[in-house]
Amino acid sequence: MDSSNSHSHSLQSICYQRGSLRLLDQRRLPLETVYLDIRTSTDGWNAIKDMVVRGAPAIAIAAALSLAVEAFNLNFSGTSTDAASFLTQKLEYLVSSRPTAVNLSDAATKLQKLVLNVAETADEPKAVFEAYIDAAEIMLTDDVNDNKAIGFHGARFLQSQLKDSERLSILTHCNTGSLATAGYGTALGVIRSVHAEGLLVTGSRLTAFELVHDMIPATLITDSAAAALMKAGRVNAVIVGADRVAANGDTANKIGTYSLAISASFHKIPFYVAAPVTSIDLSLSSGQDIIVEERSAKELLNADGGLGKQVAAPGIAVWNPAFDVTPANLITGIITEKGVITKVAADAFDIKGFIDKVK
Ligand SMILES: CSC[C@H]1O[C@H](OP(=O)(O)O)[C@H](O)[C@@H]1O
């Protein structure tokens, strides 16, 4: 199996060959392109925690592959049951790196079930490790395929909503492209698929960098300019990613998403979430139970996204939530690789019904 995910000229956050994983250090973009070698699940945990790799799908895949590399290079003496215990404990540890994106825990749960199942009949630990590595590699290739399907469904749906000669002018927010996934992207994947003139972007460092790199026409704005742009009539759709979608459609995403949704609602602009089905958490009835990660004050007070020396307001109190939760009533539709989830009643999604139908 060609387990690498090398493809077209898009940026790659995850460079993987069996036995080797390198992660693009996204903290240093756009000025430096530096890849870090990841040899163990501990390297993987640190890379996720410190946002070397970021993006809900990307952190799940980076976690799984960091353990795949560790397993591939491990001299293991023990039974197949011991191998399954080793892997399940490492996956539990990896899940603790960041709490909000459900993709990480979803991937870990699926991989834990797999290794425990294989260990029941495997004669030796090697079979358990190989089954794990195969499954982790499939997650890598599936993610790119899922994102292309999200792009296809999203582009087709958005264009079906256009009037006459209207052209799409999409506002997006935060890191949802090839840097936040194994490739192609979710919300940015829709934009890639649409590739319309006059795309408007908030979220400068990573998304703008990626759009320029891929020569997709875009205009960079600040978060605080979004409402004024909507009022000027220059936006006719908003598309964002997701870290976790609750059963009723409430969605956790990068901080600032909620205020975008409020502005879009006020200006009667459709607001879409683009995410793979693995971002949906049916165990949560609503968004009020989603854990919102708070990050270090250094990310606001220090230069270089927290890597550099302090440059702002020593001693000031800081509140730095990484996400907020947008209520379902502000969301027009949820674009997935299985199709677009629209509302069945005035302001309600039937996400479980959709999932059951497309299974
Ligand atoms: C397709 S990525 C979805 C989501 O993940 C990002 O979170 P982070 O960069 O903190 O890992 C961001 O919220 C994106 O919108």
Image (cartoon, helix red, strand yellow):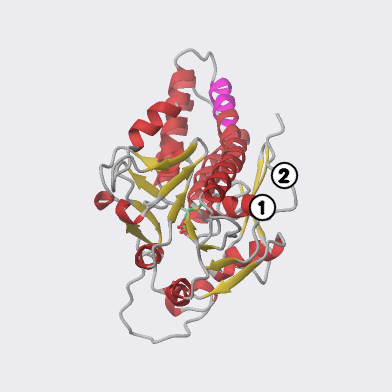
Is 111 rendered above or below residue 61? Answer: above
Q: Position of residue 231 (x, y in %)?
A: 44, 74
| Neighbours of disc 1 within 10 Å: few (<14), some (14-19), many (20+) | many
Q: Is mark 1 within 8 Å of ligand 1?
A: no
The magenta span reads: 125-133
Provide the secondary structure element on which disc 2 rests: loop
To which residue does mark 1 refer?
A: 12
In-image side of 19 versus 234 (left or right): right
Marker count (numbered): 2
Q: Nearer the viewer, residue 143 or 13?
A: 143
Task: Name which residue lies at 37% across and 52% down.
Answer: 100
Provide the secondary structure element on which disc 1 rests: loop
Is 119 rendered above or below residue 301? Answer: above
Residue type for callout 2? Ser
Mark sitting on residue 6: 2
Task: Name which residue lies at 47% across and 33% down.
Answer: 87
What is the quadrant of residue 19 in the picture? top right
| Neighbours of disc 2 within 10 Å: few (<14), some (14-19), many (20+) | some
In-image side of 330 versus 270 (left or right): left
In the image, residue 229 lies in the stretch drawn in magenta: no
Quick check: marks 2 and 1 in contact, CB under 8 Å? yes
Is 319 rendered above or below residue 214? Answer: below
Residue type for callout 1? Gln
In-image side of 166 versus 282 (left or right): right
Whether residue 79 is visible, yes or no, is no
Is 203 rendered above or below residue 286? Answer: below
Q: Position of residue 178 (x, y in %)?
A: 61, 53
Q: How many angstroms separate mark 2 from mark 1 (CA)?
A: 8 Å
Q: Position of residue 345 (x, y in %)?
A: 29, 42
Q: Of label 2 and label 1, which has the lower sequence position? A: 2
